[in-house]
Image (cartoon, helix red, strand yellow):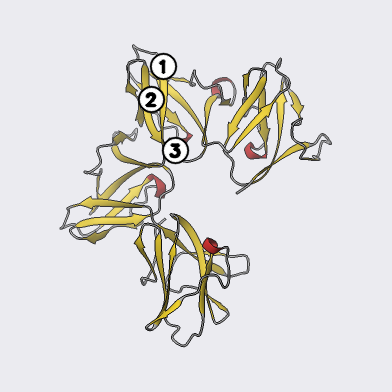
Amino acid sequence: GVNRLTRNTIVQLAPGKIRFFLPDHKTARQVYISGSFNGWSTMQTPLQRCDSRWTATLNLQPGKYAYNFIVDGKWVNDSYNKLRELDTYHGYNNIFFCYNYKFVLKGYPNARVVYLCASFNAWKESDLGMIRFQGNWVLPLFLREGTHAYKFRVDGEWITDPANKVTRPDGRGNLNSFMGIGDTLIFTLKGYPVAKKVVLSGNFNGWNSAELEMTKTRGGRQLPYVLRPGGYEYKFIVDGEWITDPTNPYSVGEGQGTNSYLAVKPNHWFRLDQHSDADHVIVTGSFNNWNKNDYRMDLRQGTWWFPIYLKPGKYTYKFRGDNKWIIDPANKLWEDNEYGTGNSVLWIEP
């Protein structure tokens, strides 16, 4: 996310420190700011009069926020902020981002225009214009956790980041720079000592078959990669042959469509203490459109397990073992369904 302001009504003074300005209301008696950062409180965050404008400074975590001003009891939008979203009252809220990263391209003093193009903005060529600052080109912005591919476009010429040694092929004969925000995972494939090339591919990189070539180690191959919390499917490509992760018991799909499944920072574990004699058990529900082949659970010491990361909210689910539907015997929360057999209910708290 990048702020789109026609006037500097929002200034980031330091990491996590945001100052708001409200001009054009010189005769106002009382001004508040209300937004997602204070629970939309109408009286919690007052602005102070400063010369001919109103101002407030907030300490915020990096991220996306919605807000509006309240001037003498009336809701007022920030007319200098182009970012806005519809609210539930036939109006709109202004949107701003608290930044956590800054891209810098050193040099190029004679360049007329420089753009940042990346996987997080669908590689749009003229969307994220960089700013000339102290002899360099810079662009602060908010980035979510994960791995991001990017390039700079200098007067129409695409270049990788000269200050970043991490580059990877895009599968079309070009290189992209890569950076990550968050904790680093180590994908590992043991064995295959005579393999010439091993590639990691998954839904986190569009199943690109050339981008993530793994490094050879004494015991096999490995690749560090940053992923934000969530659920991911992946495979290894060993000399052109697609294989699932032999050390990962969790999978989705069936037959040739089977992929290994990884939950990054799971916030729930499904558990079934019964049916240990079943050939296999899956857990499925509203979180995966009730797919009958996802997600395959792991049997450990007589108990079936499956880790998952779910966004806050309500979910319905069931287990399915040897083609038999099983309501969760350990969960007292359930609701009826159209078949009269009931579904278990799971709530994930914010």
**Which circle marks residue 103 in the picture?**
none
Q: Secondary structure at mark 3?
A: loop
Q: Give the side of residue 31 with respect to residue 186, left or right.
A: right
Residue type for callout 3: Leu
Check disc 1 and give the amino acid type. Answer: Lys
Three-letter code, disc 2: Val
- In percent of width and height, residue 75 lies at 56, 76
Q: Is residue 186 left or right of residue 332?
A: left
Dot 1: element: strand
Residue 227 visible in this rendered orientation of the protein: yes
Residue underneath mark 2: 199
Residue 314, quarter of picture: top right
Sequence-wise, the earlier of marks 1 and 3 is: 1
User: From mark 2 to mark 1, how far is it between C-alphas?
Assistant: 13 Å
Instruction: State the separation of the CA atoms marked 3 and 2.
Output: 17 Å
Q: Residues within 10 Å of mark 1 (few under 14, many from 20)?
A: some
Q: Which residue is mark 3?
A: 227
